Amino acid sequence: MPRDFLTGARDAYDVIVIGGGLGGLTCANLLGRSGHRVLLLEQHYKLGGLATWFKRPGGRIFDISLHGFPVGMIKSCRRYWTSEIADSIVPLRRIRFDNPMFSLTTTFDRVDFTRLLIDRFRLERAAVESFFERARGMRFYDDQSTTVGDLFESFFPGREDVVRLLMEPITYANGSTLEDPAIAYGIVFSNFMSKGVYIYEGGTDGLIARMGRELRRNGVDIRIRCPAERIVAEGRRVRGVVVRGRFIGARAVVSNASLHATLFRLLDRQQVDPAFLEEAESVRLNNSSTQVYMALKPEESIDESTGDLLFSSTARSFRTESLLGRDITSRTFSFYYPRTRPHAPPRHVIVSSTNARYEDWVGLPDDEYARRKRILMETTLDALDRYVPRARDRIEHVEAATPRTFERYTGHPSGTSFGTKFEGLKVSRGVPEQVRGLYHAGSVGIIMSGWLGAINYGVIVANEVENQLMAESRTRVPANDA
Amino acid sequence: MTAAEIREEILDILSDIAPDEDLSGLEDGVAFRDQLELDSMDFLDIVMELRKRHRIQIPEEDYGALASMASTVEYLTPRMKDMERA
């Protein structure tokens, strides 16, 4: 008989969290910590969502999305997780750019960017300072009609090289383009480019293991291999979730599934206003990615001067279009030195990431799909040779992930690796107004994406759930505890 | 709690949230954001801490009331006047 992954689960909880991505995990952790009974459902066999990893023989571990996050992760992990987790976050020292316009290495903070923009790019200090101030002052309720492209043009007219320096890392980090609202860029930029890029020492596996322990300590009932089948609501009020054919009740349900999966796959359309559904349908998904994972032979190493994160491109100019197409010439290399996993066998691993369109990969016959994957790996190895000489001779393991891979493991429509475009935030925030007790806390709106955005969105939603639970307990039980 | 006690309580919460900030020279009439390195998550933490400590619920539309110490105390005084300081 197949194993029952719900053995011992209760018939009802205060809160059910659907999805164990960083947003879902953080939300579950805070609610569990407050003493609520929380059930966390994860469809995959491990937690983390896109914050994940895979292992191959010989002690090789490849991280899927651990390639750098802003300093704010330290604070968020300390407050909403543990100081043990926060203390394992370390800065990346060498962020490199190499393209036909410029080659440079930076510590990726405001001071160093200012220096580079003045000394290398010959900009006036006043222009640089006012750009940073403008970006820092942006709030998400500001005007949305100004695009990122407009913003750059007003501060650095005609300077494609400056745009490339300031935009390429953000595009890589969250899939945003010059056509997106400037405020999304400003918020991410001021988070991301003010105090450097950080990484988790111990790898994604180490982080997620610690999070799992903390969740259990806070009494969260974690169930893997448990894909939610349906969110049950009656009269615009959430009642629970059907999982593995079983109904489990809840006063609140938080969906960390993608916005579209939540509204169109899990929820009954009758529970939502037609106008809201229409708005949700028009929310654009962000792009997907391809990644190539490469491991050096055990006796081989890479000199640390190669950098930690390398934004590499042979494209003469910076165009959004050329960042998404299949004939990609822009890729980001993440170099993992043995210090990334101090307790594991010393291995040098490289992950190359590119943004990609789902449409370019879906529906291909098997042999054509395999052929394109091979081309992806070959062109990546060619590009890497410039930074890791004789790369092909020194690498013993190569494999690739495509938008189809991301779709398969996350269940995200179109394999989106950065959630939705900006407009998705409003829809996500509007879910509880449609169905009382139902919340969405997944990657949306560019700013609620990435590791830090996902964690913080989990906190924001946990706060709302707590308000609801508290208001309900007040009406049920006379408040005599003051 | 009196207004002065509420102010003390807010200072206590702030010292948890921003342990590296010197709060002794805080000016009540000036926005927190202009004196301290507080981001929007820090403000949310103030909200969550008030709920945890005093079971006070602050709806999102009222978050603007937490802009400065003076406006925070003014907002909280009617809501906390019947409470005892722990």
Image (spheres, coloured by chain):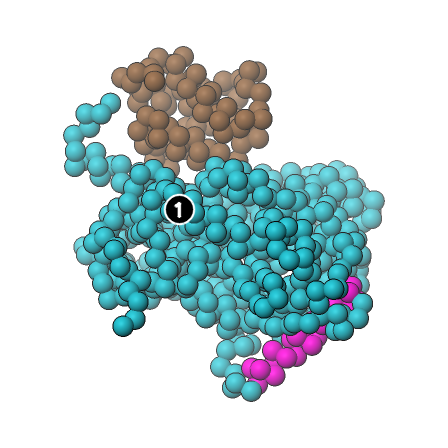
Residue toward you, A294 or A364: A294
Residue toward you, A357 or A423: A357
Q: Residue at x 48, y 51 (%)?
A: A209
User: Would you place residue A389 above or below residue B14 in this image?
Assistant: below
Q: Residue at x 62, y 66 (%)?
A: A58
In the rendered image, the quadrant that contains the C terminus of chain B is top left
Q: Residue at x 25, y 55 (%)?
A: A8
Q: Which contiguous range is marked in magenta? A: A368-388
Which x, y percent locates residue A148?
A: 61, 53
Chain the render paints brown = B
Which x, y percent locates residue A114?
A: 75, 42
Where does label 1 land, which residue? A215
Residue toward you, A115 or A40: A40
In the rendered image, the quadrant that contains the N terminus of chain B is top left
For the residue carrying disc 1, how many other residues have a C-alpha within 10 Å: few (<14), some (14-19), or many (20+)? many
User: Would you place residue A178 above or below residue A81 in this image?
Assistant: below
Residue type highlighted by circle 1? Leu
Q: Chain of mark 1?
A: A
Which x, y percent locates residue B59?
A: 34, 35
Residue toward you, A351 or A314: A351
Chain the render paints cyan = A
